[in-house]
Amino acid sequence: MASWLLRIPGGEISFEQTCVIGRSSDCEAAIDDPNASRRHAFLRVVGSGVVVEDLQSRNGTFVDGRLIGSPTTISTPARIIIGHTVMTLEPAPPRPTRRSVRPGPMLQAPDAVQTTTDVPDRAMLDRARAMLAAGRNDEAAGGASILMRRQSGMGPRAQDEFVRGVSEVLVALAMRTGDARWLEGLFGVNTDCDRVIPGELVDVIEKLVAPGAVRLLPAYVEKMRARAATLSPADRMVIARIERLAH
């Protein structure tokens, strides 16, 4: 029977038959996460794959960014997210060695950014999108806030896919909650990262924003106008549309 390896922050465990993930110390993979149930998910090796089953948990189990509603079989490495804990499930290398699992760092509130450095941007973005899809705006907001701070901190060095991804999440949150602070964040992160906001997002923003209502919008327009000569005609049209919202 194939062996599999579950990697969690601070440790890993190999198993050939079953593994339970949860907050309880009785679980083979005990995680210190208040958003996890005591017995949250059940992993069962079947043939060359693993069946991942949510044990009717309060907050659900995500496999590769998708909230699973029934037992899900995986046969290649996958990312499992429970609460704010990101884990990797993969086939174990030959002659695996069983290691003890100890609680690792946990993703906490948005203002505790120093505790989230072990959670990759892609995993954070996948989770924020999954939370939006599940209608869990508060949890999506936590991930979006952290991603926003990370990308702003990188400035122009930030990768396009993450700036765009967090921008999409921020616009979705503004649309769902009616809270203009998410649009402030949108213009703030794109100003810091020196990016032109995608035109399809501007389509939505125009419906959400009253002229002059977003405090950080003028600074964004000013920065983009300063580099107008380097922008494409299409990008200049986008900036012109945004500029109309600044007055």
Image (spheres, grey):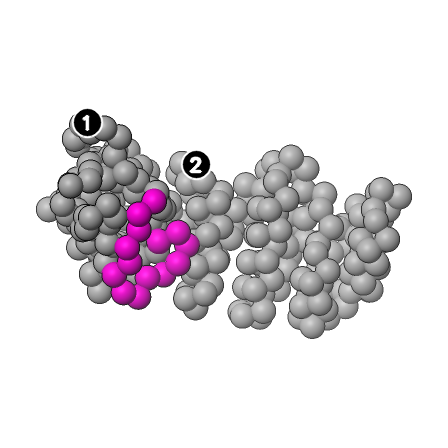
Checking the image for residue 95, the label placed there is 1
Mark toward the start of the polypeptide (2 vs 1) = 1
**Residue 54 at x, y percent in the picture:** 24, 60
Residue pictured at 56% horizontal, 64% vertical: 172
**Residue 225 at x, y percent in the picture:** 85, 48
Q: Is residue 125 magenta?
A: no
Calculate the distance from the C-alpha at mark 2 to the C-alpha at mark 1: 31 Å
Residue 73 falls left or right of residue 233: left
Amino acid beneath label 2: Thr
**Residue 201 at x, y percent in the picture:** 67, 62
Given residues 46 and 106, the one toward you in this image is 46
**Residue 79 at x, y percent in the picture:** 36, 46
Residue 236 falls left or right of residue 49: right
In which quadrant of the rendered image does the N terminus lie?
top left
Amino acid beneath label 1: Arg
Q: Is residue 128 visible?
A: yes
CB of mark 2 within 8 Å of CB of mark 1? no
Q: Look at the picture and state if 134 lies above or below 117.
A: below
In which quadrant of the rendered image does the C terminus lie?
bottom right
Q: Is residue 72 magenta?
A: yes
Residue pictured at 63% horizontal, 44% vertical: 160
Given residues 107 and 18, the one toward you in this image is 18
Q: Is residue 152 visible?
A: no
Question: In what element is the residue under mark 2?
Answer: loop
Question: In what element is the residue under mark 1?
Answer: loop
Q: Residue furthest left?
A: 26
Given residues 55 and 155, the one toward you in this image is 55
Determine the image quadrant of residue 183. bottom right
Residue pictured at 68% horizontal, 48% vertical: 190
For label 2, the residue is 117
Q: Residue furthest bottom?
A: 207
Please report the bounds of the magenta region as a residue range.
Answer: 63-76
